Image: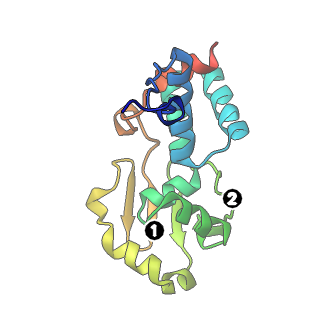
Amino acid sequence: MPESPSEQKGKKRRARKISDYGIRLREKQKLKFIYGVLERQFRRYFKKALSDPQNTEEVLLRLLECRLDNVVYRLGFAKTRNQARQFVNHGHILIDDKKVDIPSYNIKAGQIITLKSKSLEIPSVQESLKETKPDKLPPWLERKGPVGKVKKLPEKDDLRTDIDISLIVEYYSR
């Protein structure tokens, strides 16, 4: 028996081809989500990267990678970037022996990131420190126990490759 028109609704949906704009937008949204950055802040990072004489793509990624919450995550003090952000917000992180509670704080080469001694009692911190081996850290970071150091700023080889940054540059260049 043939289906009535009301039963056919929704069955013949075609998969739409994503436009070039949609592809670029999706890539930008993916990067924003990974680093936990809102639109206004992301646009600010892009403008800063664009004004830099170096490669815009590389500078944008470096700015995002050098955020304090990301560095805390990369050092293995936290299991996720959201958890790292919360540790920073709650004042568990010291930079060069000064409390910093701003997740977007820009880390510079040579700075030392430390967990407060009281923070070492938190079970999730203890677990994260045990799980993350210092040999699995990015080459621009080093860690000994609850103390991490930024050896140098991340270079092109140290940055993410699963995101097509050129699409994001094209998105903002329209």
Can you name the residue that lies furthest to the front here? 1
Pointer 1 with pointer 2, Cβ within 8 A: no
As drawn, the residue found furthest toward the left would be 135
In this rendering, the answer to whether 141 lies above or below 143 is: above
Q: Is residue 84 above or below residue 61?
A: below
In the visual, does 112 lie left or right of 102? Answer: left
Q: CA distance from mark 1 to mark 2?
A: 16 Å
Identify the element where label 1 is drawn: loop
The quarter of the rendered structure image containing the N terminus is top left
SS at mark 2 in the image: loop
- Outermost top residue: 174
Q: Earlier in the sequence, mark 1 or mark 2?
A: 1
Residue denoted by label 2: 102
Question: Relative to 152, does residue 56 appear above or below in the rendering?
Answer: above
* Label 2 neighbour load within 10 Å: few <14, some 14-19, many 20+: some
Percent coordinates x, y for residue 173 in the rendering:
62, 15
Residue found 54% across the figure and 83% down from its top: 117
**x, y percent for residue 3:** 43, 32
Q: Is residue 66 visible?
A: no
The residue wearing badge 1 is 77
x then y, percent, for residue 34: 50, 46
Residue 33 picture location, percent across and down? 55, 45
In the picture as drawn, the residue positioned furthest to the right comes out as: 40
Q: Residue at x 46, y 84 (%)?
A: 123
Disc 2 residue type?
Answer: Ile
Specify how the rendered protein is coloured: rainbow
Residue nearest the viewer, comparing 70 with 96: 70
